[in-house]
Image (cartoon, rainbow, N blue to C red):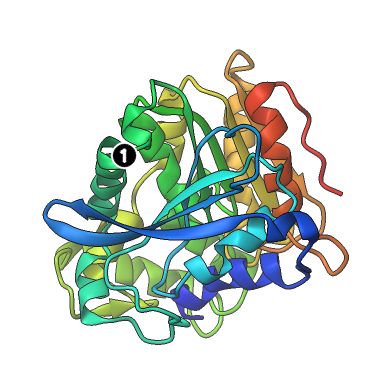
């Protein structure tokens, strides 16, 4: 399965059962421009102009692919409180209203782990409101691949005071593919195989800067940094409240990856970490009768105020 499609499934599954509400109508999504390293970029701010107070700023990082995520951003926060306050930096080369079926040359050239990391750190340093925020006053929320990336931002920016992820775990993605292959999950076991992945990993290592060769919907240059990063080591270095949510039946990231996080932090109860597993849920935390992504996000407002909150899954 194309890797871009896999992570797009998070958006589809998480938003499939959404129905707009009156409180949602009060929020506005504003588009802005900002210059990062001399390049004009789009970013968005979701807020409620009628709110009596501004809530904890949330810096949202979406998953892989070049779809126009901004068109769906607001839906994830429909059950959040009136003080919703979300910032989202769009990737380079994303086209307006794009479904992500075909990514631009500009997008592919910029779709690199290190560039995305640096761009997000710099955004916090130059965005007019966020640059004035004190240390540990901003939350980072990562969806899918954004969840694998978010711990690095928490590590690299002193402004981050909370880390929340949905649809990602603690293992390198190279190991996640092999887990699915061993389990017999398509397409990792059929038509692909463990031997195929091991062969491709060596190919990517040998040609790590190649922007033309493709593997699972991304360039070798993208994968050379993405496949072998170890998010668990980054999580272990953090000393802020952390919560990671996954669906038990996640079809894009094996639940074993989330369990790796859970089991590691069980050894360090002094760390402020929670693992939330949604029973029977998909990559987007959803089941036919439960929009887990909305439920999870709605509870973040209380979590920001009390790190000991027990997250509900229904």
- Horizontal and vertical percent for residue 166? 60, 50
Tell me which corner region of the image, top left, top right, bottom left or bottom right, holds residue 224: bottom left
Q: Which of 181 and 279 is in front in this view?
A: 279
19 relative position to 89: left or right: right
Q: Residue at x 63, y 28 (%)?
A: 304
- From this view, report whether residue 311 is shown above or below residue 40: above
Q: Can residue 307 be seen in this view?
A: no
- Horizontal and vertical percent for residue 163? 52, 35
Q: Which residue is drawn at 38% across and 21% down?
A: 134
Q: Mark 1 points at which residue?
A: 128
Q: Residues within 10 Å of mark 1 (few under 14, many from 20)?
A: few
267 relative position to 141: left or right: right
- Horizontal and vertical percent for residue 36? 19, 51
- From this view, report whether residue 74 is shown above or below residue 160: below
The residue most toward the left is 38
Q: Can residue 70 be seen in this view?
A: yes
Q: Residue at x 64, y 35 (%)?
A: 262
Q: Nearer the viewer, residue 223 or 77?
A: 77
- Horizontal and vertical percent for residue 41? 26, 60
- From this view, report whether residue 36 is shown above or below residue 220: above
Q: Nearer the viewer, residue 111 or 237?
A: 111
């Amino acid at each position: 399965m194309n890797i871009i499609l896999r992570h797009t499934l998070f958006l589809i599954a998480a938003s499939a059962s959404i129905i707009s509400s009156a409180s949602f109508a009060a929020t506005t999504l504003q588009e802005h421009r900002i210059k990062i390293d001399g390049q004009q970029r789009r970013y968005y701010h979701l807020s409620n102009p009628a709110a009596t107070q501004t809530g904890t700023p949330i810096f949202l990082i979406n998953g892989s692919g070049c779809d126009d995520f901004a068109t769906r951003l607001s839906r994830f926060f429909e059950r959040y409180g009136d003080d919703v306050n979300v910032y989202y930096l769009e990737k380079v080369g994303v086209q307006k209203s794009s479904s992500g079926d075909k990514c631009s040359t500009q997008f592919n050239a910029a779709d690199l782990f290190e560039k995305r990391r640096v761009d997000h750190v710099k955004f916090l340093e130059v965005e007019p409101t966020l640059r004035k925020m004190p240390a540990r006053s901003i939350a980072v929320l990562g969806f899918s691949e954004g969840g694998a990336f978010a711990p690095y931002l928490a590590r690299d920016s002193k402004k981050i005071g909370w880390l929340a992820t949905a649809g990602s775990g603690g293992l390198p993605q190279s190991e996640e593919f092999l887990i699915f292959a061993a389990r017999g999950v398509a397409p990792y076991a059929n038509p692909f195989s463990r031997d195929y992945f091991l062969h491709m990993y060596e190919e990517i290592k040998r040609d790590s800067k190649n922007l033309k060769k493709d593997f699972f919907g991304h360039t070798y240059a993208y994968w050379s940094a993405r496949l072998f990063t170890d998010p668990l080591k980054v999580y272990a270095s953090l000393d802020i409240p952390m919560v990671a949510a996954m669906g038990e039946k996640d079809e894009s990231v094996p639940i074993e990856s989330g369990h790796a996080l859970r089991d590691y932090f069980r050894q360090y109860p002094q760390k402020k970490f929670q693992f939330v597993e949604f029973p029977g849920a998909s990559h987007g935390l959803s089941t036919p009768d439960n929009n887990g992504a909305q439920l999870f996000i709605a509870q973040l407002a209380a979590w920001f105020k009390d790190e000991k909150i027990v997250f509900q899954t229904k």
